[in-house]
Image (tube, rainbow, N blue to C red):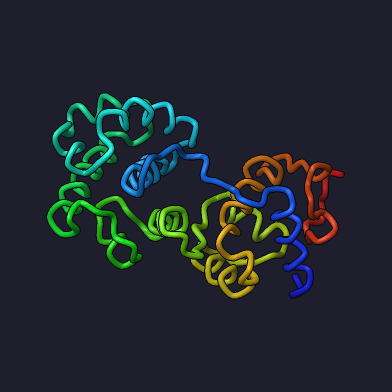
């Protein structure tokens, strides 16, 4: 995709949704971090059902540690891989208390040292909580970037690198959410709804469903 096409691509996405938001429900940087850890291989809707009651009683590292792993498991047992995720959430909460004064750090290096936190999770937290222009490449962003020709790459890391180079600066903060929403609701894996897409003329996909 050429530079002027990339600009127009994001201009149209911004026009449709000037201030896109995460579909995960959270109250502060800590609850966002917990929600993103829980969201791995799970839907945002499924996570939100579990975290609504959980965050009413445990919305800080201290309260989460006091709740304990056994009770935490009860709250998140409807979520895939909940045993491992509960263990990681208690462990990362203890580290936040011990090493970061109970606060979520605002650097990728510090975040990825936490149990259960990979680069993608760190990028979501940096983007949503700290308004850093990061790209958390999930399955939706990976598919959209490759299918449209926006930022092709064979791995999530390659797509992230390509997006960081090609997304115009004025769109960088919200690009991550625009691409997720486009992939989740329109540019779906099996049956993309090309007739509802705001950028069909800019897209390189050969089998458009118009």
| Residue 47 picture location, percent across and down | 42, 33
**Quarter holding residue 6:** bottom right
Q: Quadrant of the C terminus?
A: top right
**Quarter holding residue 176:** bottom right
Q: Which residue is at the front of the view, 3 or 57?
A: 57
Give the mark count.
Answer: 0
Q: At 64% across and 73% down in the image, what residue appears?
A: 166
Along the horizontal axis of the image, is 4 left or right of 55? right
Q: At 63% across and 68% down in the image, what residue appears?
A: 170
Q: Is residue 82 above or below residue 14?
A: above
| Residue 18 picture location, percent across and down | 66, 52
Q: Is residue 53 above or below residue 58?
A: above
Q: Quadrant of the N terminus?
A: bottom right
**Quarter holding residue 200:** bottom right
Q: Which residue is at the front of the view, 65 or 210?
A: 65
Q: Is residue 40 above or below residue 170?
A: above
Q: At 15% across and 59% down in the image, what residue appears?
A: 99
Q: At 39% across and 60% down in the image, what residue appears?
A: 119
Along the horizontal axis of the image, is 6 left or right of 180? right
Q: Is residue 179 above or below residue 90?
A: below
Along the horizontal axis of the image, is 76 left or right of 205? left
């Amino acid at each position: 995709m050429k530079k002027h096409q990339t600009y127009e691509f994001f201009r149209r996405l911004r026009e449709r949704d000037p201030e896109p938001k995460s579909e995960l429900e959270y109250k502060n940087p800590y609850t966002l971090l917990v929600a993103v850890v829980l969201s791995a291989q799970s839907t945002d809707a499924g996570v939100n059902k579990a975290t609504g009651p959980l965050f009413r009683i445990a919305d800080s590292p201290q309260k989460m540690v006091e709740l304990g792993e056994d009770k935490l498991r009860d709250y998140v047992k409807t979520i895939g891989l909940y045993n491992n995720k509960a263990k990681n959430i208690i462990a990362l909460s203890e580290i936040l208390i011990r090493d970061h004064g109970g606060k979520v750090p605002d650097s990728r290096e510090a975040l990825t040292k936490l149990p259960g936190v990979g680069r993608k999770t760190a990028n979501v937290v940096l983007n949503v909580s700290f308004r850093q222009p990061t790209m958390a490449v999930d399955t939706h962003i990976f598919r959209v970037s490759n299918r449209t020709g926006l930022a092709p790459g064979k791995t999530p890391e390659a797509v992230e690198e390509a997006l960081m180079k090609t997304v115009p600066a004025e769109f960088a903060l919200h690009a991550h959410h625009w691409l997720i929403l486009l992939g989740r609701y329109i540019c779906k894996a099996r049956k993309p709804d090309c007739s509802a897409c705001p950028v069909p003329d800019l897209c390189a996909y050969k089998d458009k469903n118009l």
